Image (cartoon, helix red, strand yellow):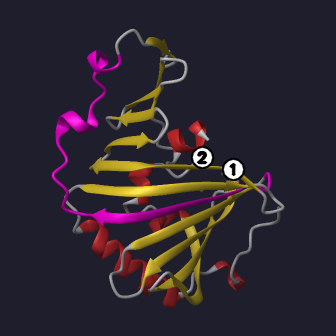
Amino acid sequence: MSLVLGGCFFVAQAQNNSLGKSDPDAKKVLDGLSAKLKSFKAVQSNFTLKVEDSKGKAQGSKKGTIFLKGTRYHVSVAGGQDIFSDGKDIWTYDKSSNEVTITKADPTTQTISPDKIFTNFYDKDFLYKLNGESKIGTRTVQEVELTPTDKTKNFFKALLYIDKTAHTLVSIKWLDKGGNRFTLETSNLNGNAAVTDAQLAYNKSKFPGAEEVDLRN
């Protein structure tokens, strides 16, 4: 779970559209989402991350809050995990071991990271098609299926659920090649949050006695 969040906060062969082209109706929906995301100055959003195995059996669930500004973010997970990134490095703090792991932020990462979720990450790297509409709670959402063009990625499909009226991302589900299913649901999304630099930065003094494991070299 921590690895998923650190890289993210997402059975079969990839399902491409015929001729390998994207669906223009899906593009309209994604363009609406993109325009909304570009209007955000800073993001604060609650989230729930659920993990299921290939048979749909629940493997775990985490709740938390994402703070984001540009490529910098802080993910605070209930139960004692904090993840900070300045766009270059990532600090992952685990309360149970009182340990901080430091890694480099890799732009070619195989997963969907928090800063990508709230940007138009799908613009160049995916084929997409519109699967239709459904309800999540009281909201009507449009489901867009993404298939990565890079077949080395560790997930073969992602599903975006986009609020038809607000043009915001309600949920994202991705399926990895091992059959696992990850669902990230957002709530109380604020695209103009008063996120401070201090909230986004790893501050050693806030984690007294924590052992640092630097894996950047």
Which residue is rendered at x = 45% and y = 71% of the image? 170
What amino acid does circle 2 point to? Gln
The residue that mark 1 highlights is 154
- Looking at the image, residue 133 sits to the left or right of residue 177; the answer is left
Residue 195 in the magenta stretch? The answer is: yes
Q: Evaluate whether residue 95 shows in this view.
A: yes
Residue at horizontal 34%, vertical 57%? 45
CB under 8 Å between discs 1 and 2: yes
Question: Few, some or many C-alpha atoms within 10 Å of disc 2 (few <14, some 14-19, many ≥20)?
Answer: some
Taking 196 as reference, is 159 above or below it? below
Lower position in the chain sequence, tag 1 or tag 2:
2
Position of the N terminus by quadrant: top right
Q: Is residue 120 visible?
A: no
Answer above or below: position of 17 versus 82.
below
Q: Which mark is residue 163?
A: none
The magenta stretch spans which residues? 178-207
Q: Which mark is residue 110?
A: 2
* Residue furthest out toward the front: 79
Image point 36% across, 32% down: which residue? 88
> x%, y% of residue 212?
45, 13
Instruction: State the SS at label 1.
Output: loop
- Residue 51 percent across, percent down from the top left: 66, 53
Q: Position of residue 25 (x, y in %)?
A: 50, 90
